[in-house]
Image: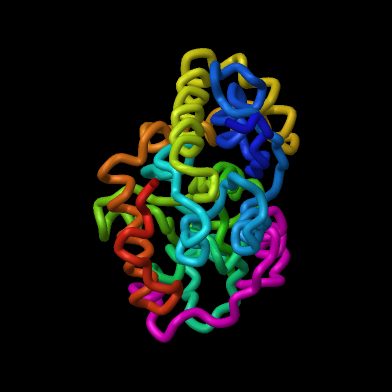
Amino acid sequence: MTTEPLQIAYSPCPNDTFVFDALAHGRVPGAPALDVTFADIDVTNGMAERGEFDVLKVSYAVLPYVLDEYALLPCGGALGRGCGPLVLSREAGLDLAGRTVAVPSEKSTAYLLFRLWAADVVPGGVGEIVVMPFHEIMPAVRDGKVDAGLVIHEARFTYQNYGLHKLADMGEHWENTTGLPIPLGAIIAKRSLGAERLSLLAESIRMSVRAAWDEPEVSRPYVMEHAQEMDPAVADQHIGLYVNEFTAELGEDGYAAIRGLLTRAAAECLVPALRPDALSFI
């Protein structure tokens, strides 16, 4: 078997660095070596569409575009409950009909959840969609450059610092209407690696997750090094929300959530329809 390191890209967010700390630093016995690149998920989504890198953390929303070349791994990603994107505004209770909304990407789970929510609860639909980096969204809403913003990750814990109000929780709407967890970020790997290497990679990621749970303090320097000056308590909240049983194994509910999201999004013509076997691991 080749010993070439696998080219992997994932975000500098605490959940990803927590999950991959042991694996990236050679503390998982028998695991493949990794050559790590840090990139925000909108960048890794584009990498996946271009077939770059062996392993990538991407949004579940990009899966319909890349699953011919990549396999969805059954572990390492982010699904959960009570962890969905939020829609924020300066004005409490703002009617979003015809309003300008900033979003971090149009190929993101957050965006799909937002469009499914808007289809249900915003008669006539929202107005212009403006794509901008997620760290610019709350200042843009605060400064009146857009009427509302769709935010993700640690913004759940910090939006009140900007004087903003929560209009809706996309995850809450999803859970209430489906009963399923929220599928956010996926780990994918090139099918050309072959069944043996894909299986080894998946088991290595599981072991890395378990190592982080067993000794969380070991991962802390790696997490905080890349956490973009995030408060340690916020980093811990972030990890607590996004690293859970679905990270170790998608399981029946995890796969049902992914199929449910992408099937509903395809019905709204937001993504292409999945082939029946598209989510198969190997």
Q: Position of residue 275 (x, y in %)?
A: 35, 66
The image quarter in which residue 5 lies = top right
Q: Residue furthest front?
A: 1
The answer to whether 67 appears left or right of 13 in the picture is left
| Residue 1 visible | yes
Q: Position of residue 262 (x, y in %)?
A: 38, 64
Closer to the camera in the image, 2 or 59? 2
- The number of numbered badges drawn on the structure is 0
User: In the picture shown, does residue 84 fall above or below 15?
Assistant: below
Residue located 51% across and 54% down the image: 70
| Residue 242 visible | no
User: In the picture shown, does residue 1 fall above or below 25?
Assistant: below
Magenta-span inclusion, residue 123: yes
The image quarter in which residue 83 lies = top left
Magenta-span inclusion, residue 109: no
The answer to whether 177 appears left or right of 89 in the picture is left
Q: Position of residue 81 (x, y in %)?
A: 36, 43
Q: Position of residue 231 (x, y in %)?
A: 67, 31
Closer to the camera in the image, 259 or 163? 259
Q: Residue furthest bottom?
A: 124
Closer to the camera in the image, 82 or 105? 105
Residue located 47% across and 14% down the image: 214
The answer to whether 133 appears left or right of 154 in the picture is right
Residue located 48% across and 31% down the image: 200
Quarter of the N terminus within the rendering:
top right
User: In the picture shown, does residue 280 fall above or below 2?
Assistant: below
Q: Which region is colored magenta?
A: 118-147
Residue located 50% across and 79% down the image: 126
